[in-house]
Image: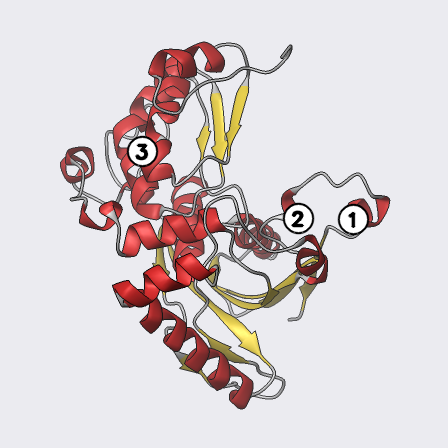
Amino acid sequence: MAGIIVADASDEAALLAMATQTKCVATMAGPFARYGGTLVKVCVESGTDYVDITGETHWVREMIATYDDAARASGARIVHHCGHDSIPWEISTLMLANKMSEKGEELARVDFYDKIKSAPSGGTMETALGIMYGKESKLKKPAAVKALGFDPLLKLQGDDSKGEPSQFATSARNVKSLEMAKGKGGQVRTLFFMAGVNGNAVKRSNALNGYSKKLVYCEGQAFGSTLSATIYLAGLAFYGLCLAIAPIRALMLATGIVPKPGQGPSAEYMDEGYLIVEGTAKGSAGSIIKSTMQFHCDPGYKGKLNNPQPKHQVKTTNLVINNEL
């Protein structure tokens, strides 16, 4: 068909031919640790920009360790985590850091309170199960990552980096179980399943952009009461326990309780979905700045798409930054 280029993810020559015909490749073909490495390689070699929607931090570390120097040489801009993982938290942190800089302060800490209604697709579950129980779980740390000698997410940009880590470090202290509300108007938080990925994305951005030399990042899912948070945690623990037992996991996949690749939430469910990311930033001199980003439909799937209906073009995303002190 005219205008469509077909390239298999395992065919390096075909991928290279495709990459050389465009300025930027946007890929959604995961699991990326299984299917994505060759595409990154050819984009780096051809100087073609690249973006993806991966949430696989271990693979991102490998790509940075392996191709960062070559990408600088070719001019290719390789940008991971450009989907639901982790654009809302990345943009919110960037905007909060910029606002804090306008006050003459460095961003010292950022807390995120997530409110979400969404459901994973089969591709997302395939990636997660592969990392936890599949062949990806058995992979050893790649030689390139070991050779670097420090966390690739802290790798500096620019020709004068000399292979040294950035001085702008981020400490991720995400909510791990249940965090009670703090102070008047505080919110109860539990662990958010993608908080670790989002924190690592911010770590990389801070290392490159220099928001703060000692940034603390803390994210959790927000609830209106301790009871609702506890019920959520109990359900999450039960679901995780079932997935951990191979026969039950197989039954969940066979019966559709866990979606398979190509399956996912219905259009109606996605219409009812939402994401609200509330951020609270603290500056080096004590200033507080708050932000709110809202998606008015499923943020993981429908929120990314160019929907032809005007109501979705208008209702996609809002970001509000407020100075409190």
Residue 312: image tag: 1
Q: From the viewer's side, name the closer residue of 172 and 36.
A: 36
Task: Identify which amino acid the numbered label 1 is placed on.
Answer: His
* Residue drawn 35% across the image and 17% down it: 11
Task: Identify which amino acid the numbered label 3 is placed on.
Answer: Met
* Mark closer to the chain start, 3 or 1: 3
* Residue drawn 48% across the image and 70% down it: 220
Packing grade of label 1 (10 A; few <14, some 14-19, many >=20) is some
Label 2–label 3 contact, CB within 8 A: no
Label 3–label 1 contact, CB within 8 A: no
Residue 50, horizontal then vertical, whole percent? 48, 27
The mark lying in front, picked from 3 and 1, is: 1
The reply to whether residue 211 is in sight is no
Location of residue 101 with respect to 232 vertically, above or below: above
* Mark closer to the chain start, 2 or 1: 2
Quarter of the image where one finds residue 269: bottom right
Packing grade of label 3 (10 A; few <14, some 14-19, many >=20) is many
Q: Secondary structure at mark 3?
A: helix
Query: Marks 2/1: CA distance?
Result: 9 Å
Q: Which quadrant does the C terminus fall into? A: bottom right
Question: In the rendered image, which residue does mark 2 sit on?
Answer: 302
Query: Marks 3/1: CA distance?
Result: 35 Å
Q: Which quadrant does the N terminus fall into? A: top right
Q: Secondary structure at mark 1?
A: helix
* Residue drawn 27% across the image and 37% down it: 62
Residue 111, horizontal then vertical, whole percent? 50, 67
